[in-house]
Image: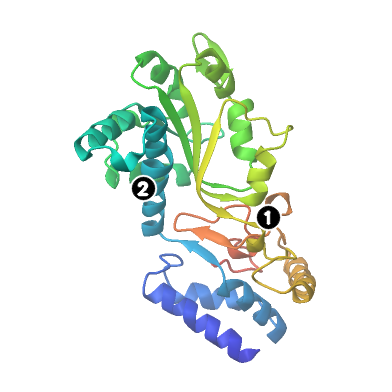
Amino acid sequence: MSKFYTDVKSKIKFYIASKIWDRPNRLSKLDGWYSNFDTPIEKYFASKILDKFIYYSYEDIIELCKYGIFQNVVKNKLIKKLELDIFIIENKQYELEFKKQLSNIAFIPLADSGRPPESSNLIAQILRDELNIQEDHIFFPADIEVVIKSHKFSHILIFDDIIGSGDQIYNFWNTIEFPFAGQNLTFRKISENNPTIDFEYLSLVATQYGLENLNEPTFNVNGLKISFVEQLTDEYRIFNKKSIFFNEEEAKTAKLVLENLCNVKGIKFKGHENLDYAVSFSHGTPDCSLPMFKVETPTWNGLF
C-alpha cells in the first residue's frame, strides 16, 4: 500500500517537473494536497484516483481544438456538402472548399451571462493564435444580432471545454436571452427565426452523463447540433461500478473512507449533480470533478 502511494506520487512529480502537467506549477502543491489525507488507507485511495487522473495540458487543448474544428466540424460539413469521398477530391479543390467552409463559420464562446469564462476565453485565444482563425470571426454571445445581420456566416459554432452535466449548454440555448431586433431572445428562438443558418455546439470533452442528459426530452436542445472530440464514459466516474479506478468492492470502501474525510474536513464530497470524475484542464478544474482537487479552505489544500 505504501509502495503504491510512493510510486504514484513520484510519477505525478515527474509529470509536474517535466511540464507534462503544466498545473500545478510547483511540487509543493502536490505535497500540500497529499497532506490532506491523514491515514495510510486515505493516502492509498487518493493515489488510486490520482494514478488514472485525466489531465489536459495547454498543448492537449490545442490539439483538441484542431481536431474538433478542422475534422469534426469543417471536414464533416464539407463531405456532406460535396456528397463525395473526401479522399478523391483534388487537393486544390479540397483546400479551396475547406477555406470557404471555414470562412462561413462564426465562433461564439459559451457563456451563461456577461463575458465568457476563462475556459472559453482560452479556446478563443487558441483559435486566433494557434489555428489562425480570423479575429473578426470570433464573437461574444451578445453579438449574435451583428453576426446574423452581417449575412457573412451560414454556420454558428458555440464552443467550450467540457460537457459535464449538460446544464450549461441547456440553459444557454433555452433560457438566457440576448438583444436581437429590439427584443430579448434566446439562441433557440434566434435559431428558429433563422432556419438557413446552422447552429452547432462543440465541446472538446463530453461526459457520458451529460450527453445522455442532452438526449432526454426534458433536456430539449432542438435545433442545436452537439459535437465533441473526446468522451468520458461511465468508466471514468470514480465510484461507478464500471470504474477504471477501483473494482466494485474497493469502490464502496473508498467512497466511505473519502466521504468521511471530506465531512471531517468540511468540504463537499462530490461535484455538481453528484458527479465524480477526475479530470482537469490547464486553465481549471470543471465542476463535474470531485471538489477535493480544487477546493482551497483553511482545512483543505487544493491540487489545482
On the image, the x and y values in percent for residue 196 come to: 46, 16
In terms of image quadrants, where is residue 211?
A: top right
In terms of image quadrants, where is residue 155?
A: top left
Question: Is 162 left, or right, of 300 in this rendering?
Answer: left
The amino acid type found where label 1 is placed reads Gly
Q: Image point 61% across, 61% down: which residue?
A: 295
Q: Disc number at residue 271?
A: 1
Q: Image point 63% across, 41% down: which residue?
A: 166
The amino acid type found where label 2 is placed reads Lys
Q: Is residue 165 visible?
A: no
On the image, the x and y values in percent for residue 39 come to: 71, 84
Q: Is residue 3 visible?
A: yes
In terms of image quadrants, where is residue 148?
A: top left
Query: Vertically, is 1 above or below 206?
Result: below
* Within-10-Å neighbours for mark 2: few <14, some 14–19, many 20+: some
Q: CA distance from mark 2 to mark 1?
A: 29 Å
Mark nearest the camera among 2 and 1 is 2
Farthest top residue? 182
- Report the front residue among 190 and 214: 214
**Which residue, given by chain and number where applicable, does mark 2 sit on?**
66
- Report the front residue among 75 and 270: 75
On the image, the x and y values in percent for residue 283 come to: 45, 54
- Report the front residue among 300 and 96: 96
* Within-10-Å neighbours for mark 1: few <14, some 14–19, many 20+: some
Q: Image point 54% across, 32% down: which residue?
A: 225
